[in-house]
Image (spheres, grey):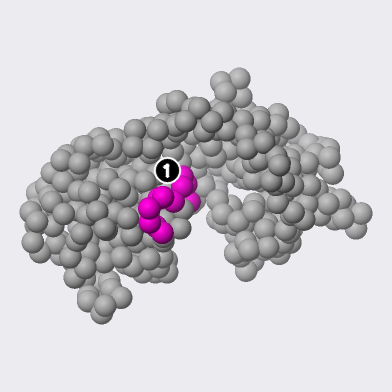
């Protein structure tokens, strides 16, 4: 059995599935990713780089499509070279969001193709235009609408599509819903269990311990899409009302989604300038190792997670798995994982006073937070690695079984 993964940032969402497949007797796993992809030890990774970027003269609405075509072209060249050397995968599992798998079927018309369908863009009802502080312009709406051309091509040619959350699946055109399986890739629930003896050493040498009034906030990068501006504006009041709490903010100064501020090099710089806080109590760690990230969740008394209606972060599920008391934004993807008053608390994304109130309530450690923490950990078992890998194996096994010559279709 030969499985080919294609992901510009391999392994990305395929880490657990690729690791599982690499351990199966008789299964050969190969991957294709960008030259800067991190890769993983157990899987051979072929790296590529597009021969050029989008032409500056390309219309802005079509620039992302041209970029996708350039990525797809380079991967097609690699696939054709592999084919000439006698390689033929039984199944290709790809993240098509950057165009790499656009031409898989040109190289291997009969190979089963599985696409990870992460996001389908909308000009209303999702992330775009959600925050009135950053209004959507007519040009921006047209560009967003045009992005979906590539996603529609991806949906047309794949044999199976996978979406990790029901809300993400709902964004795709209804005509394709029957083709999209609901499979979350999974998080390491057991590896994230709570630890009442946990400690976290901060960059300045200060030690924080589980049971202390520690507030945590995590994002790959600190930016409005993940509610960083709303959190920073609430912090001065939280710090004033609770003089002994400590705040740990994990995340980089780049931009994953949206744009940089016009009047500052980063959102952290801008929002600190507008909302000064005591650096002895508010600790910006930057990006940290996974071990330190896990320690931060384990010492957290209340974890704040805010997001636009957009792709749900792994960090929210990992906070639940760590038994955190989570205060999160009442936005569509979050409601799928958190039920208010059952396994966490939800607040309106734009209601700063409600955010302050709930964080202070959690820090006061009322008896109900004990039950909420336990329920948080129990609820997140639905997103375990074992469940995610098992669902992938079942769906892909059935798909490949239909191809003929695959026996039972099992890996």
The answer to whether residue 371 of the structure is visible from this angle is no
Q: Position of residue 22 (x, y in %)?
A: 65, 60
Rendered view: 338 above or below 14 = above
Q: In the drawing, does residue 161 fall left or right of residue 320?
A: right
Residue 264 part of the magenta segment = yes
Residue displayed at 16% across by 54% down = 236
Residues 161 and 355: in front is 355
Looking at this view, name the residue that lies furthest to the bottom. 205
Dominant secondary structure, magenta: loop
Residues 174 and 70: in front is 70
Query: For residue 251, what is the image quadrant?
Result: bottom left
In this rendering, the count of numbered labels is: 1
Q: In the drawing, does residue 153 fall left or right of residue 350?
A: right
Rendered view: 170 above or below 404 = above
Rendered view: 335 above or below 365 = above
Residue on which disc 1 sits: 312
Residues 52 and 44: in front is 52
The answer to whether residue 81 of the structure is visible from this angle is yes
Residue displayed at 64% across by 41% down = 64
Report the span colored magenta.
256-266
Q: In the drawing, does residue 351 fall left or right of residue 174?
A: left
Looking at this view, name the residue that lies furthest to the top. 175
Q: Position of residue 162 (x, y in %)?
A: 58, 37
Residue displayed at 38% across by 56% down = 264
Local packing at callout 1 (Cα closer than 10 Å; few below 14, some 14-19, many 20+) is: many
Residue 400 part of the magenta segment = no
Rendered view: 130 above or below 246 = above
Residues 386 and 74: in front is 74
């Amino acid at each position: 059995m030969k499985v080919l993964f294609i992901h510009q940032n391999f392994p990305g969402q395929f880490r657990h599935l690729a690791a599982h497949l690499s351990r199966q007797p008789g299964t050969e796993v190969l991957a294709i990713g960008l030259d800067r992809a991190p890769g993983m030890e157990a899987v051979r990774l072929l790296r590529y780089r597009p021969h050029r970027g989008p032409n500056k003269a390309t219309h802005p609405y079509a620039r992302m499509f041209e970029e996708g075509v350039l990525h797809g072209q380079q991967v097609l060249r690699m696939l054709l070279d592999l084919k000439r050397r006698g390689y033929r995968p039984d199944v290709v599992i790809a993240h098509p969001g950057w165009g790499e798998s656009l031409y898989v079927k040109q190289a291997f018309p009969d190979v089963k193709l599985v696409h990870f369908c992460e996001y389908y863009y909308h000009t209303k009802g999702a992330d775009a235009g959600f925050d009135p502080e950053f209004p959507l312009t007519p040009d921006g709406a047209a560009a967003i609408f045009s992005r979906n051309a590539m996603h529609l091509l991806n949906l047309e040619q794949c044999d199976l599509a996978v979406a990790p959350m029901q809300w993400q699946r709902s964004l795709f055109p209804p005509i394709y819903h029957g083709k999209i399986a609901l499979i979350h890739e999974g998080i390491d629930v057991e590896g994230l269990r709570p630890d009442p003896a946990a400690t976290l050493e901060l960059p300045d040498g200060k030690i924080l311990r589980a049971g202390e009034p520690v507030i945590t906030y995590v994002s790959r990068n600190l930016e409005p899409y993940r509610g960083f501006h709303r959190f920073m504006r609430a912090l001065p009041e939280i710090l004033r009302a609770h003089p002994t709490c400590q705040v740990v903010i994990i995340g980089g100064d780049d931009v994953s989604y949206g744009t940089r501020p016009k009047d500052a090099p980063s959102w952290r710089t801008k929002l600190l300038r507008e909302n000064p806080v005591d650096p002895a109590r508010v600790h910006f760690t930057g990006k940290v190792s996974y071990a330190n990230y896990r320690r931060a969740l384990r010492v957290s008394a209340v974890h704040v997670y805010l997001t636009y209606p957009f792709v749900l972060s792994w960090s929210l599920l990992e906070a639940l798995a760590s038994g955190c008391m989570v205060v999160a934004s009442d936005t569509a993807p979050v409601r799928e994982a958190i039920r208010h008053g059952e396994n966490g608390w939800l607040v309106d994304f734009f209601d700063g006073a409600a955010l302050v109130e709930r964080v202070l309530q959690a820090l006061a450690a009322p008896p109900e937070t004990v039950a909420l923490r336990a329920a948080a950990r129990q609820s997140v078992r639905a997103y375990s690695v074992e469940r995610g890998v098992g669902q992938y194996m079942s769906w892909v096994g059935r798909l490949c079984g239909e191809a003929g010559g695959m026996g039972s279709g099992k890996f």
